[in-house]
Image (tube, rainbow, N blue to C red):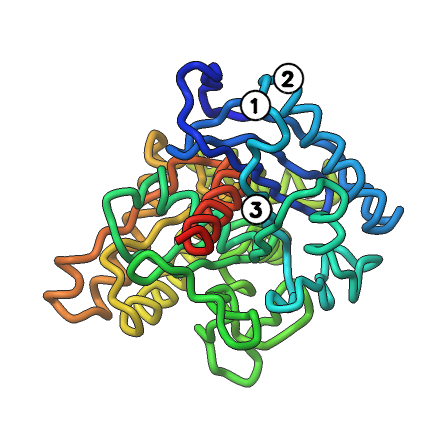
Amino acid sequence: MTSQPIIPLAQSQQPYFLGVDLGGTGVKIGIVDNAGKTLAFDSIPTREEAGPQQAVDRMAQAGRALLEKTGIPHNHLARVGLGSPGTMCLQRGILVEPPNLPHWYGFAIRDALAKAIDCPVSFINDANAAAYGEFWVGTGSAFHTLAMLTLGTGVGGGIIHEGRLINGVNSAGSECGHIIVDSSPDARLCVWGGGRGQLEAYSSASAVAKRAQELAMLRPVSCLAAQLSSAGTLTARNVYDAALVGDELALEIIDEAAFYLGIGVATIVTLIDPGLVVLGGAMNFGGSKCSVGQRFLAAIRRVFDERAFTNVSAGTKIEFASLGSDAGYIGAAGTAKADYERISH
């Protein structure tokens, strides 16, 4: 389900765009109008192990069904936006070696989807798509430049400078989760088994869960120790639930993740001075409406303030994302809109 209000066709603004947010387990698909409003939404399973072509065919089928449902003729669909996990080659529209799509290596997904749905496709990294969604109609809608961190299984990132995404020469621009926050020789490894000491290894949901399992065994009085004993494993959600009831270990783990995020934010802001850093993804510890989320954000802010120039600190907002899991398909549609306008003009 989408959390966005679904508007009727009569209240929409042409042209129309289809946003597709591809994930390792599911695909979110929405028809979005020129103002970033959602007219229709659907989600389908990825079925990764069955290969990419079957998923592309079902994406196209779902897109056509949404057009029919809303009464939009196919020729009124201006462009499709596809957000996908990396690694990728944006110029050629190819998935290179995406870690959570292991059966899809080397697949020319952009052109395959364009053929299946008979419409041009804009291809983009999924975290960049989420950042663009927040920039277009979310937390960053009043800003020209922003950086976004998506906190989930890993840590994704998106940077928009003066209205344009930083995609990079090698299609790896804005990979903020892989900046170095710990240069020690025994620093932790990131969740995908990549570089050592990267932000993802300290502040992702996977890192939080791993840290909780390590420390719970040493702190038998913690709620987390009891959970680990009964379930045999821990998740970032378990840490959040324990923090809600004041568990000291859970709060320490969240504070530690916030500490490294503060370092990461300070590094990003030093490079681009965006004015706004948006925190998105599933791991927000309740967000701004929850005391644990407020504590998490305040801890990040405190570490950032200690490391930033005074004037930069004063002129930089750090806020939670507002579109939730809808940012991906909305941002994918937004990048399609940007490409459509660029080509049209």
- Label 3, label 1: how many angstroms apart (C-alpha)? 15 Å
Could you tell me how far apart the alpha carbons at marks 2 and 1 are, in whole angstroms? 8 Å
- The answer to whether one can see residue 224 in this image is yes
Choose top left, top right, bottom left or bottom right for residue 233. Answer: top right
* Residue 90 position within the rendered picture, expressed as x and y whole percent measured from the top left: 60, 65
Q: Which disc is residue 81 wearing?
A: 3
Q: Secondary structure at mark 2?
A: helix
Instruction: Pick whichever, 162 or 151, lies toward us.
Output: 162
**Residue in the image at 63% along x and 35% along y:** 28
Pinpoint residue 60: horizontal percent, then vertical percent: 73, 37
Picture layout, residue 285 above or below residue 12: below
Name which of mark 2 and mark 3 comes first in the sequence. Answer: 2
**Quadrant placement of the N terminus:** top right
Residues packed near mark 1 inside 10 Å, few (<14), some (14 to 19) or many (20 plus): many
Name the residue that disc number 1 marks: 40
Residue 287 numbered mark, or none: none
Q: Secondary structure at mark 3?
A: strand
Disc 1 marks which amino acid? Ala
Three-letter amino acid code at disc 2? Answer: Lys
Sequence order check: which comes first, mark 2 or mark 1?
1
Find out whether the residues at labels 3 and 1 contact each other: C-beta distance under 8 Å: no
Residue 161 is drawn in which quadrant? bottom left
Residue at disc 1, secondary structure? strand
Q: Give the quadrant of residue 141.
A: top left
Report the residue that reaches farthest toward the bottom: 185
Q: Tell whether label 1 touches label 2 (CB within 8 Å).
A: yes
Estimate how packed mark 3 is, as few (under 14), some (14 to 19) or many (20 or more) residues with alpha carbons within 10 Å.
Answer: many
Name the residue rendered at 76%, 55% in the picture: 101
Q: Which residue is mark 2?
A: 69
